C-alpha cells in the first residue's frame, strides 16, 4: 500500500515537472498577465469602443470585466474581427490603422490559453483617461442639433437636419469633431455642405428632423423611382465629414483646411440604431478655424456608378468607376461606400503613362464598419492620372446581411438598395476650382459615361487618357 502511494506521488511529481518544463520551454505563459501586458493592449486598441457609453457591447477596462470574455477575445483577435480594420496590409499605409500586430495577437492568445492570469497588482498601469469633452480642444463654433428621441427598437430611416451656419464670410475649417449625445445609438453620421444657390432639399424644414424619402416625396421601396433618384440636379454637394464610432478625428494635416463658403447650410444625416431602451440624442458638431489662410484646400469627392443592376442571387457582381484629373492634386484618404450587399472594394491610381497601382484594397467590406482610410503619405497625382475604383457585391443567400437575394438590386439611398461610392479626399491649391479638376464637369460627385468605363486598367484598348 505504501509503495503504491509512493508510486502515485512519484508519478504525480514527474507529471508536474514535465508539464512545468513544457510550459516554460515553448510558451512563457506565466509571463503574460493582465496587469502587465493585456490591459495595455486593451487600452490602446479596444477601450475607445469598449467602455461605458460607447458602442462596444461590453466594457473591457478591468480584469473583472475582461475575464469572462477571455475566450471570445481570443476568437475575435485571431480571426481579426476586432479591432475593426479592413484594408489589406499589402497596399498602402494608413495613419488610422488600428489593427493588432502579430506580437499583440500572440500575447492575447497566449494569455487566454494559459488561463488568463491577473498577475501582480503592482504591474497595473494607470487607467487610460478618455476625454469627455471635445478632443479637439475648445471649438471656435458648435452646431447643436435639436433633441431626437430614439425609440427602444425598430428600424429608423436615415434622419436629416438642416442647420444654417450663419457664416457671413468664407471659413477655413482645420478641425472637425462630431459628438453624438448618445453614442450607443448613433451608428454613423454624415455632414454635407449646401452652398447658397443649391436647390438640394430646399423644401426640407430648418432645424427639424426629417427623412429624405419623406422630404423628396418618394415612397421607400418605390422601384419606379429608384433609377431617377441620383440624377436630380443637386447631385453632388460636398461632404464635410463622416462620423464613425471609434473613428478618430484626423486633422487634415498642417497647412490644410476645408472650405465652408459664406451662407452655407450644413445638412446632417444620422443613422440611428435603437439599442433596446428609449433614449434622447443631441448630436453636436464642433469646428476650429485655421489661424492663417491654409496652403492647401482639402476637398471630398466621390466617384460613383449609378448604373448598377445586380441580378438576383449573383454572388460576385462587379462595378467600376473612375475619375480623370486634368490638374495635379494630392490624394490623402479614401472612403469606400456600399450597402448591405457590398463585398469588396478597391482603388487604383493609373499614371498618364498607364502604370496602375492599387492604393487601397478592402477584401472583406462590412457595411457596419464604413471606415475612412487616411494615407500616411499623401500621393501626388499628376495631371492626366486616373483614379479607378472597383466594387464587388454579393446578392446571394450566402451573404448573411442580404435583405433579399431574390430581387434585382438598383441604385438607391436605402440600405436595401445599393450604392457605389468611391469617396476620396484631395488636397489642392486654394486657388484651384474643385469643379474643374476633372475631365468631366462635376460638382463633387463624378460619374463616368459608359464608353469611358470600357477603358480601365487591365484593358488593352485604353487610349483615351485625356478624355
Ligand atoms: C471601433 C470600435 C471597436 C473597437 C476599437 C473594438 N471593438 Fe470589439 N466590438 C465593437 C462592437 C460595436 C461590437 C459588437 C458588434 C460586433 O460584434 O461587430 C464588438 C464586439 C466585440 C466582441 C464580441 C462580443 C460578443 O458578444 O460576441 C469581442 C470579444 C470584442 N469586441 C473584443 C474587442 C477587443 C479585444 C478589441 C481590441 C483588440 C476590440 N473589441 C476593439 C466595437 C469595437
Image (tube, rainbow, N blue to C red):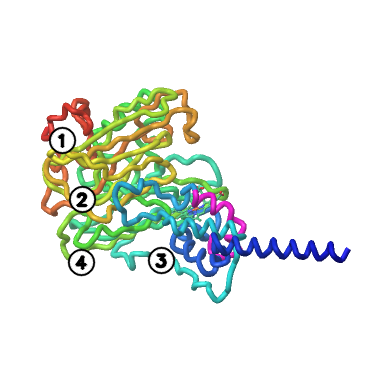
Residue 466 falls in image quadrant:
top left
Residue 186 coordinates in the image, percent (x, y): 45, 50
Stretch in magenta:
60-78
Q: Which residue is mark 3?
A: 133
Task: Indicate the quadrant where residue 19 lies.
Answer: bottom right
| Residue neighbourhood size for the residue with mark 3, other residues' Cα within 10 Å, grouped as few (<14), some (14–19), many (≥20) | few
Q: Are marks 4 and 3 in contact (CB under 8 Å)?
A: no
Check disc 3 and report its element: helix, strand or loop. loop
Q: Earlier in the sequence, mark 4 or mark 3?
A: 3
Residue at label 4? 291
Give how far apart the Cα atoms at labels 2 and 4 are.
26 Å
Tell me if mark 1 has few (under 14), some (14-19) or many (20+) residues whose alpha carbon lies within 10 angstroms of its own: some
Question: Mark 2 or mark 1, which is nearer the start of the sequence?
Answer: 2
Of pointers 3 and 1, the one earlier in the residue sequence? 3
Q: Residue at x 12, y 39 (%)?
A: 353
* Residue assigned mark 1: 440
- In this rendering, the label closer to the viewer, 2 or 4: 2
User: Left or right: where does residue 158 sit relative to residue 353?
Assistant: right
Q: Nearer the viewer, mark 1 or mark 2?
A: 2
How far apart are the alpha carbons under marks 4 and 3?
22 Å
Q: Which label belongs to residue 379?
A: 2
Amino acid at each position: 500500500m505504501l509503495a503504491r502511494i509512493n508510486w502515485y506521488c512519484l508519478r504525480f511529481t514527474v507529471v508536474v515537472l514535465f508539464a512545468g518544463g513544457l510550459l516554460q520551454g515553448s510558451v512563457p505563459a506565466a509571463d503574460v498577465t493582465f496587469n502587465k501586458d493585456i490591459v495595455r493592449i486593451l487600452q490602446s486598441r479596444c477601450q475607445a469602443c469598449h467602455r461605458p457609453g460607447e458602442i462596444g457591447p461590453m466594457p473591457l477596462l478591468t480584469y473583472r470585466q475582461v475575464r469572462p470574455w477571455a475566450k471570445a477575445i481570443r476568437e475575435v483577435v485571431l480571426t481579426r474581427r476586432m479591432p475593426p480594420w479592413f484594408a489589406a496590409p499589402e497596399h498602402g499605409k494608413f495613419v488610422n490603422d488600428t489593427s493588432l500586430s502579430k506580437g499583440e495577437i500572440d500575447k492575447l492568445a497566449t494569455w487566454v490559453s494559459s488561463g488568463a492570469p491577473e498577475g501582480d497588482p503592482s504591474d497595473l498601469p494607470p487607467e487610460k483617461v478618455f476625454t469627455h469633452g471635445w478632443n479637439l480642444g475648445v471649438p471656435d463654433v458648435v452646431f447643436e442639433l435639436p433633441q431626437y428621441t430614439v425609440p427602444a427598437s425598430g428600424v429608423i430611416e436615415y434622419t436629416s437636419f438642416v442647420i444654417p451656419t450663419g457664416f457671413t464670410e468664407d471659413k477655413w475649417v482645420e478641425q472637425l469633431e462630431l459628438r453624438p449625445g448618445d453614442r450607443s445609438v448613433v451608428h454613423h453620421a454624415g455632414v454635407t455642405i449646401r452652398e447658397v444657390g443649391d436647390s438640394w432639399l430646399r423644401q426640407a424644414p430648418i432645424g427639424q428632423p426629417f427623412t429624405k424619402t419623406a422630404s423628396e416625396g418618394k415612397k421607400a421601396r418605390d422601384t419606379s423611382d429608384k433609377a431617377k433618384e441620383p440624377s436630380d440636379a443637386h447631385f453632388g454637394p460636398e461632404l464635410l465629414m463622416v462620423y464613425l464610432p471609434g473613428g478618430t478625428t484626423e486633422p487634415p494635416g498642417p497647412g490644410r483646411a476645408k472650405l465652408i463658403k459664406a451662407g452655407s447650410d450644413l445638412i446632417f444625416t444620422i443613422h440611428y440604431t435603437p439599442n433596446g431602451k428609449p433614449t434622447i440624442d443631441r448630436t453636436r458638431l464642433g469646428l476650429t478655424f485655421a489661424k492663417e489662410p491654409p496652403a492647401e484646400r482639402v476637398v471630398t469627392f466621390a466617384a460613383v456608378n449609378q448604373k448598377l443592376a445586380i441580378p438576383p442571387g449573383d454572388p460576385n457582381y462587379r462595378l467600376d468607376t473612375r475619375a480623370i484629373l486634368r490638374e495635379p492634386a494630392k490624394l490623402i484618404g479614401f472612403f469606400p461606400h456600399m450597402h448591405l450587399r457590398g463585398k469588396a472594394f478597391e482603388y487604383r491610381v493609373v499614371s498618364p503613362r498607364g502604370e496602375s497601382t492599387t492604393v487601397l484594397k478592402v477584401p472583406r467590406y462590412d457595411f457596419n464598419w464604413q471606415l475612412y482610410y487616411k494615407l500616411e503619405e499623401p500621393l501626388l497625382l499628376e495631371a492626366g492620372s486616373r483614379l479607378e475604383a472597383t466594387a464587388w457585391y454579393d446578392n446571394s443567400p450566402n451573404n448573411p446581411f442580404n435583405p433579399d437575394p431574390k430581387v434585382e438590386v438598383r441604385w438607391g439611398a436605402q440600405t436595401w438598395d445599393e450604392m457605389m461610392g468611391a469617396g476620396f479626399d484631395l488636397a489642392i491649391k486654394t486657388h484651384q476650382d474643385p469643379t474643374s479638376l476633372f475631365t468631366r464637369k462635376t460638382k463633387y460627385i463624378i460619374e463616368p459615361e459608359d464608353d469611358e468605363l470600357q477603358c480601365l486598367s487591365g484593358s488593352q484598348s485604353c487610349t483615351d487618357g485625356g478624355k
